[in-house]
Image: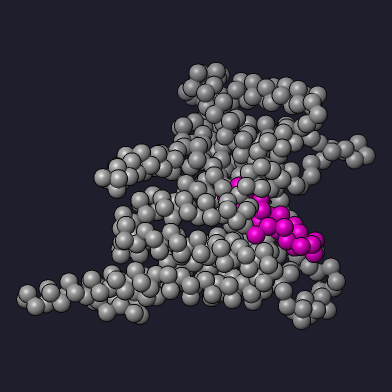
Amino acid sequence: MTTKKTNRFINDRVIPLAGKMASSRHLTALRDGMTLAVPMIIIGSLFMIIAQFPIQAYLDFMASIFGKNWATVLQYPTNASFHIMGLVALVGISYNLAKSYQVDPISASIISLGAFILTIPLKTDHGALWIPLQEFDSGGLFTAIIVGLFITDLYVWMVHKRWTIKMPDTVPPAVSNSFAALFPGLIILILVWLIRIGVEATPMESIPNIVSFFLADPLSHLSNTFMGALVAEFMISLLWVFGIHGANVVLGIMMPTWLSALNANQVAFSAGKPLPNIVTTAFFDNFVHMGGAGATIGLAMLLAFASKSKELKTLGKLVAGPALFNINEPILFGLPIVMNYKMLIPFILTPLVNVTTTYFAMAADLVAKPMGTYIPWLTPPILSGFIATGHLSGSVIQLINIVLDTLIYWYFFKSMDREKLANELRHQKRF
C-alpha cells in the first residue's frame, strides 16, 4: 500500500512539478541564455590550451620561436571570450525571455544591457571612465542574470500595457520597434538609476555588492561542495528516470555557479596560482557523465560485448558508438531506462560514485582539478580528462570511474540479459 501511495505521489505531484520547471519560460530563458556563452568559452579554452599546454618541452619550443611573451599574446582571445561571459548571458537571457512573450527581443536585450551597465560602478583613471573586465565575466554573472530576467519582465509588462509610442503601419519595423522601446526603456533606466543612487547611500555601496553578498556567494559556497554536487547529480538522474530531461532542470539553476567556478579556475591557472574549485561544469561533463546521464558508458559496453540475448546484443551495437561521445538517448529510451524501475538503482548510484571518487581524489591532490577550459561534452572520455585537467591523472580517474561504473551495472545487466535470453528461448521453442 505504501508503494502504491509513493508511486501515486511521484506520478501526481513530483513529475508534473518537474515538468513545469523544465518548461518554465524563465528557466528555459536562463538555460538558453547561459548556453549562448558556451561557444565563446570553448573558443577561449582552445587558445588557453595552446598557450599553456602542460608539457614543458612544448612551452620551451614555442618560447624559442615566438619569444617569451608568446603565451600572453596568444591568450588575448581567451580574455575576449571568458571575460564577456556575463555580458553574453545577459543578452541571451533577455532575448530568449522576450521572444517567449512574442515581444521584440532585440529591443528588450538592448534595454537590459543598458540597465546592466548602469548597475556597475565605473572606475576613473586620469579623467577617463572604464569598466573592469571582471564585471562582465563570472564576477558580474549573477547581476546579469537578475537584470536579464527582471528587467525583461518589466519591459514586457509595459509593452503589454501599451506604454509605447505607436508608429503608422507605413513605418519600417526596425524604426517602429525602436520607438516602441523608447518610453519603456526610459522608465527602466530611470528606475535602475534611482535604485543605484539609493544603494550607494548604504554600506553595500553598489548593486553588484548586494547581489554577491545575498546570492552569488552563498549559492557558490553551497553548490561547490561535495554535498551540493551529490544533490545536484541525484536530481539529474532521478528526473531522467521519469522521462524528464534532468540536466535541463538542474543546469538551469546550477550552471551559473558552475560556470563561475570554471572561470575562477581559468583565472587562477593563467596567473599560476592554485586552482580554487573542484565542482565546475567540467567536473560533471568530463568526470561524472561519461557516456551521458547516469554514466552509462559501462552499460553500453556490456550491452555490446557481454550480451547473450540477441535483442540486447543488437541494441549494444547501436548504442556503443554514441556512448563514446556521451550520447545515451538510445539507451535511455531503447533499453529502456526511462520508467524502468529495475534500472533505477544503478542509474542513480553510478554517477554518485563518480562524484565521490573524483571529488575526493581532486581534494587530496591525487588528481589535478579542472584548469578552467570548457571541453565540449561530446569529447570522448580519457581524452577529455587529460584536456580538462592538463594532466594524465585526469585520464586515470576517468578510467577508474569507467571500471567502477561497469561493475555497478554488471549485476543489473546480467539479470536483464538472463531474462531476455530466457524469453527468446521460450519463443523459439514455441515456433
The furthest residue to the front:
1
User: Is 210 in the magenta?
Assistant: no
Disc count in the image? 0
404 up-or-down from 359: above or below: below
Camera-nearest residue between 177 and 191: 191
Q: Start and end of the magenta stretch?
A: 255-278
Q: Position of residue 234 (x, y in %)?
A: 47, 54
Identify the residue at horizontal 23%, vertical 71% (top origin).
419
Q: Position of residue 19 (x, y in %)?
A: 39, 42
Q: Position of residue 233 (x, y in %)?
A: 50, 55
Q: Quadrant of the N terminus?
A: top left
Quadrant hosting residue 310:
bottom left
366 up-or-down from 21: above or below: below
Quadrant hosting residue 20:
top left
> Quick check: 357 left or right of 235?
right
Q: Position of residue 154 (x, y in %)?
A: 57, 26
Identify the residue at horizontal 34%, vertical 74% (top origin).
303
167 up-or-down from 41: above or below: above
